[in-house]
Amino acid sequence: MLSYTGGLVLLAALLHASWNAMLHGNRDRYLSMAWMSIAIALISTVAALMLPLPPAAAWPYIVASGLVHIVYNINLVRSYSSSDLAVAYPIARGSSPLLVALGAALFAHEAITPIHALGIALISGGILTLALLDRHVSRAAALTALTTGAIIALYTVIDGIGVRQSDGQALAYTLWMFTFYWGTVLVFVARRGITGLLGPIRSNPAAVTSSFVGGLVSIGAYGIVIWALQSGAMGMVSALRETSVVMVVLIGRVFLREAVSAKRWAVCVVVAVGAICLGL
């Protein structure tokens, strides 16, 4: 069962890396995130109404996670606007497992073993080295990426505890949480107006379509993670998911034509090894 779960979480990592590459690859990332959010919220709203409601105990976590995800979406776009995918993504995703492990230990009483401590050291060291290697990355850009990592850890811990209050209704929990993505759409419309949202359907249909598809991929990616959080330790699930750090650097190199030095590859591998240590 562990290998089956682990395999699905690794699939989620690949899906997650893919939709992040779609987001970063679009020129107007705020628009892309808005249309991703429309896809996520629309499908989730329709599907959620067909399922029984999650129990009352799960709703505080659904609401909290949904609101945090809105902040995450906005901050993610800011992070990708200030640095390459191969830089912003490893910093954000690489910093979250250690924060998840600490949060799980504090709020869910999950133990941190010596191998977990080694994983934390590898991830922290890898992130610091990555920041030093990419000297063109400003402190503001690095801080934005680290903030994204902290937000990821926050919603992962919230969902890790919340889904365990759902009486096995992981799907309903996930779908209702995703309905809060309408909030991201509202933030976009408040900034650019409804014309800014709908106009690109005619002027740039390819970007709208790819963003909508990215939203569908995102549902699958995080849905698998929430399902795994029902029974798996939060640190393990988060760690396996963050092996996407290596995947996204490869995607950035192959599809987005981003330069990736041998040193950056080595550091990403160190971060991924640290993440795997956290999952042992």
Image (cartoon, rainbow, N blue to C red):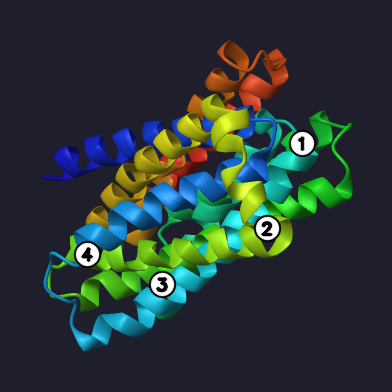
The residues tagged by marks 4 and 2 sit, at their Cα atoms, a distance apart of 28 Å
Please name the residue that numbered disc 1 is placed on: 83
Label 1 or label 2, whichever comes before in sequence order:
1
Left or right? Give the position of 134 relative to 150: right
- Of badges 3 and 1, the one in the foreground is 1
Q: Amino acid at mark 4?
A: Ala
- Of badges 4 and 2, the one in the foreground is 2
Label 4 or label 1, whichever comes before in sequence order:
4
- Of badges 1 and 2, the one in the foreground is 2
Q: Amino acid at mark 1?
A: Ser
- Badge 1 marks a residue whose secondary structure is loop
Residue 164, quarter of picture: bottom left
**Image height of 65 relative to 257, above or below:** below
Please name the residue that numbered disc 3 is placed on: 158
- Badge 3 marks a residue whose secondary structure is helix
The residues tagged by marks 4 and 1 sit, at their Cα atoms, a distance apart of 36 Å
At a point 54% along the width and 19% down the height, the residue shown is 250
At a point 69% along the width and 37% down the height, the residue shown is 28
Q: Residues within 10 Å of mark 4 (few under 14, many from 20)?
A: many
Left or right? Give the position of 12 relative to 125: left
Tag of residue 138: none
Q: Amino acid at mark 2?
A: Gly
The one nearer the camera, 14 or 6, is 14
Q: Is residue 108 visible?
A: no
- Picture coordinates of residue 214, whole percent (x, y): 44, 36
The residues tagged by marks 3 and 1 sit, at their Cα atoms, a distance apart of 28 Å
The residues tagged by marks 2 and 3 sit, at their Cα atoms, a distance apart of 32 Å
At a point 67% along the width and 48% down the height, the residue shown is 196
- Picture coordinates of residue 136, whole percent (x, y): 89, 32
